[in-house]
């Protein structure tokens, strides 16, 4: 199924679907996690250049990344017992828990996201590694810079000058080595243009309202200007130091223009800003990043909205899969079923039909990637929002991706609380061909 979406379309979908927001829509039912960063992390460095509202200047009440709609865990989730529908639409692909993870280049990459705060704790790493290995996972994406702007890599001049550096991971080289020694493929996740701290510390690099005020979205988060080449250099500098620390891959997140809030009032350094120039800017940034990082021997990947796999344009945020795929090794659409509006792909409730939701999204993505499943590595949902997700819900997504030949996927949970049993469990039933129509009934 093909869509044509812009930022105004995103806003329309947000207003239509308050419970199941589309990518980029702020959740209206979910609450921010109250979990504080691990106590083992160090106190954040104050900065005279940072705004009092800067997230890097004082202890945060929630883990980095919590604003992303996908990072929320709904406090009002409704428990949904499994029915025959889910059993039939979510057959397990895995029964290989006892096998040690193989190099990501020779087997399906089975990854999980790990917050930078937790990665800085030796105790948390050991526990996490044990759980990963027992469940057959072989890759980890560690957040080194999130949307709040805090940077967990030392020695980056702009991070030091702006007060963005936080010593959350005291021994980054050692932490990376610990994972790699266990055969785990390591990915450094770096948020790029959604940077609340730097936008406030350096307003000259930020997006503004027409009257010159700092532009913020509906949650009060500021963005840096994607046209500013100093921001490009900043992201590449962080990535270069991550590569030097031993990471196998650099993954750029928030590599896009603002999607929610009063985006029509965004003013950039490029006065003739259009959807086309936005896509061009992202291509130019990726071209530069690839040229700088390739000699360091690391792979390059990007995160995109889930719906970019199903639209004919860049959704007004610059993300065109067909124009970005040739510049990166992997693309990771965030295909969280909870983020698709009711009726998307003709499904009554995508959140309750994870198998078909992911299957539709993957098929559309493969069309735009010229049927190259090796280039596609989606983020899948391992959290509850609106519907209580069980191991079968998670397994349904994995099954859908692997049936279509996708050779890698990453689970997302903002609190590092993963459903390890989703891969440890044996087959439920023999995989069945996925029905395209009519939509399967909802889980009740």
Image: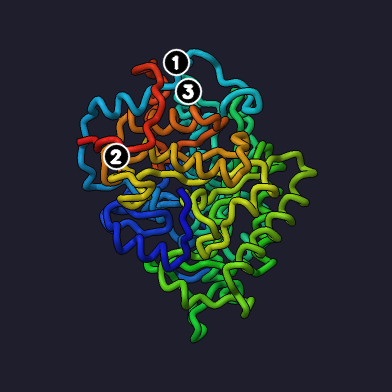
Total numbered badges shown on the rendered structure:
3
Q: Nearer the viewer, mark 3 or mark 2?
A: 2
- Give the Cα separation between the discs numbered 1 and 3: 18 Å
Residue plotted at (52% across, 65% down): 316
Disc nearer the start of the sequence (3/2): 3
Q: Residues within 10 Å of mark 3 (few under 14, many from 20)?
A: few
Asked whether residue 316 appears in the rendered view, the answer is: yes
Q: Nearer the viewer, mark 1 or mark 2?
A: 2
Q: Quadrant of residue 269?
A: bottom right
> Residue 330: horizontal and vertical position, in percent?
62, 41
SS assignment at label 3:
helix
Q: Position of residue 341 (x, y in %)?
A: 33, 52
Which residue is situated farthest in the front direction here? 437
Residue at 62%, 62% in the rendered image: 279
Question: Which residue of the protein is positioned furthest toward the bottom in this rendering?
Answer: 211
Alpha carbon distance from label 1 to label 2: 24 Å
Residue nearer the viewer, 28 or 212 = 28
Residue drawn at x 50%, y 57% is 147
The image quarter in which residue 440 lies = top left
Element class at badge 2: helix
Name the residue that disc number 2 marks. Answer: 352
Q: Position of residue 359 (x, y in %)?
A: 44, 37
Q: Is residue 411 above or below residue 207?
A: above
Seen in the image, is 13 located left or right of residue 42?
left
> Label 1's element?
loop
Please, which colouring scheme is shown?
rainbow
**Pointer 1 residue:** 95
Instruction: Give the residue at mark 3.
Output: 130
Taking 232 as reference, is 10 left or right? left
């Amino acid at each position: 199924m093909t869509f044509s979406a812009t930022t105004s379309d995103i806003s329309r979908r947000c207003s239509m679907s308050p419970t199941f927001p589309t990518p980029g829509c702020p959740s209206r039912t979910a609450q921010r996690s109250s979990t504080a960063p691990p106590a083992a992390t160090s106190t954040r460095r104050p900065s005279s250049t940072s705004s009092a509202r800067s997230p890097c200047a004082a202890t945060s009440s929630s883990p980095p990344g919590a604003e992303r709609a996908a990072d929320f865990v709904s406090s009002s989730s409704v428990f949904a017992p499994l029915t025959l529908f889910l059993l039939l639409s979510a057959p397990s692909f895995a029964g290989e828990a006892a096998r040690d993870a193989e190099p990501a280049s020779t087997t399906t990459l089975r990854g999980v996201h790990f917050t930078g705060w937790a990665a800085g704790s030796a105790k948390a790493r050991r526990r996490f590694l044990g759980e990963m290995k027992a469940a057959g996972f072989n890759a980890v994406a560690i957040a080194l810079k999130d949307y709040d702007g805090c940077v967990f890599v030392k020695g980056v001049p702009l991070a030091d000058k702006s007060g963005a550096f936080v010593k959350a991971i005291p021994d980054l080289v050692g932490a990376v080595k610990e994972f790699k020694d266990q055969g785990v493929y390591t990915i450094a996740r770096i948020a790029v243009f959604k940077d609340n701290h730097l936008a406030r510390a350096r307003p000259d690099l930020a997006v503004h309202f027409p009257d010159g005020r700092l532009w913020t979205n509906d949650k009060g988060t500021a963005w840096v200007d994607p046209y500013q080449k100093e921001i490009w250099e900043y992201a590449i500098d962080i990535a270069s130091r991550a590569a030097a620390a031993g990471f196998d891959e650099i993954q750029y997140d928030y590599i896009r223009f603002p999607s929610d809030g009063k985006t029509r009032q965004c003013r950039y350094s490029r006065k003739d800003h259009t959807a086309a120039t936005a896509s061009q800017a992202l291509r130019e940034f990726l071209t530069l990043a690839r040229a700088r990082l390739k000699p360091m021997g690391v792979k390059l990947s990007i995160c995109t909205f889930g719906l970019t796999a199903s639209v004919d344009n860049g959704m007004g945020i610059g993300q065109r899969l067909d124009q970005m795929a040739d510049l990166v090794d992997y693309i990771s659409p965030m295909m969280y079923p909870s983020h698709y509006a009711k009726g998307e792909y003709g499904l009554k409730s995508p959140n309750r039909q994870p198998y078909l939701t992911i299957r539709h999204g993957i098929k559309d993505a493969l069309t735009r990637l010229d049927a190259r499943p090796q280039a596609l590595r989606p983020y899948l949902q391992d959290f509850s929002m609106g519907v209580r997700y069980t191991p079968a819900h998670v397994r349904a997504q994995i099954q859908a991706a692997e049936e279509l030949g996708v050779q890698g996927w990453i689970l997302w949970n903002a609190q590092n609380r993963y459903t390890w049993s989703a891969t440890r469990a044996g087959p439920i039933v023999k995989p069945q061909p996925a029905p395209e129509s009519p939509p399967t009934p909802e889980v009740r």
